[in-house]
Image (tube, helix red, strand yellow):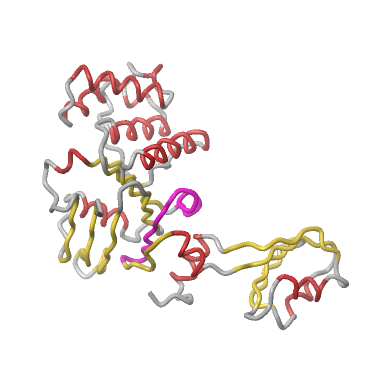
Amino acid sequence: MAILDVRNICKSYGKFKAVDDVSFEVQPGRIYGMLGPNGAGKTTTIRMVMNILIPDSGSIVLFDQPMTEQLKQRIGYLPEERGLYPKMKIIDLLQFIGELNYIPADEARKRAEQWLERLDLAEHALKKVEELSKGMQQKLQFIATVLHDPDFVIFDEPFSGLDPVNVNLVKDIMLEFKAQGKAIMLSTHMMEPAEKMCDDVLMIHKGQKVLDGNLQNILSEHGERSIQLETKGDAAFIQSLDMIKNFDHYGNYIEVQLNDGFNANDLLKAIVDKVDIIRMQSHRSSLNEIFIALAQGGKNDA
């Protein structure tokens, strides 16, 4: 059973259509990526899921029922904008948030201390929120999101403001949640971490769904193979070969895509006696490259 089932939701502001007929499902034990550039409609979609905004049309079902205040206790939501009380001490803030989620005070404080230790914030527990750096506040917001042990967690740009070490730390925790059977929805414009983490993805552009499905299937079906070459000598002639579909030249580095019916061996035979090849490897299109192609009207007509 899907944790979240969204069907044909639309949301407009005047004549501007922020979300236009978007449908998707989020399953337990999987990470679902909602991907797209800033302004694509991701946050508006999440706010409709959380019942902060009401869709103009369409339906949203959570845990096999419409959203209620009681259901919100089973959901953790990390918004892109921070919603922390700047004058409160960190430990007091987390205890307060725990109590709002019906956790007894002693238990809420105990969980807060454990999470502060896990995210390397324990030594700052008695500081006020406003005394923390941007990255520390993001980690604090993360703790506030998961303190009540939700079954479904929505992260809107969770890596914002984090350095690579803390990105890795948060990523590992999210993968632990997945292993525990929690449903995770990750909204981001950063394609690279999404490609490494997500099981399923929704690509959204200008409020419309560009593509939706299993990540590996999308990479296989919509990705194109390219060949990367490092050469010594003038390799500009490669661009004129009949087999070349796309050609990008970066000095000693070249990336090409071949026309249908040709492969890497054909390219190698055509150039091996004309230029010194230092390195040659085949490369599958990244999620970012696929999104750009589809957003610009590429081969997918979804």
Give the x, y percent position of residue 49.
22, 53
Q: Residue furthest right?
A: 273
The residue under the point 59% across, 63% down is: 284
The residue under the point 17% across, 22% down is: 104
Location of the C terminus (image quadrant): bottom left
Give the x, y percent position of residue 283.
63, 62
The image shows residue 262, relative to residue 26, as above or below, that is below
Location of the N terminus (image quadrant): bottom left
**How many numbered marks are there?**
0
53 relative to 77 in the view: left or right: left
Give the x, y percent position of residue 277.
82, 63
Looking at the rendering, the stretch of residues picked out in magenta corresponds to 190-207
- Name the residue nearer the viewer: 144 or 127: 144
- Name the residue nearer the viewer: 165 or 211: 211
131 relative to 92 in the view: left or right: right
The image shows residue 33, relative to residue 10, as above or below, that is above
| Quarter assignment of residue 6 | bottom left
The residue under the point 26% across, 57% down is: 45
Is residue 276 within the magenta segment?
Answer: no
Give the x, y percent position of residue 199.
41, 53
89 relative to 134 in the view: left or right: left
The residue under the point 64% across, 72% down is: 257
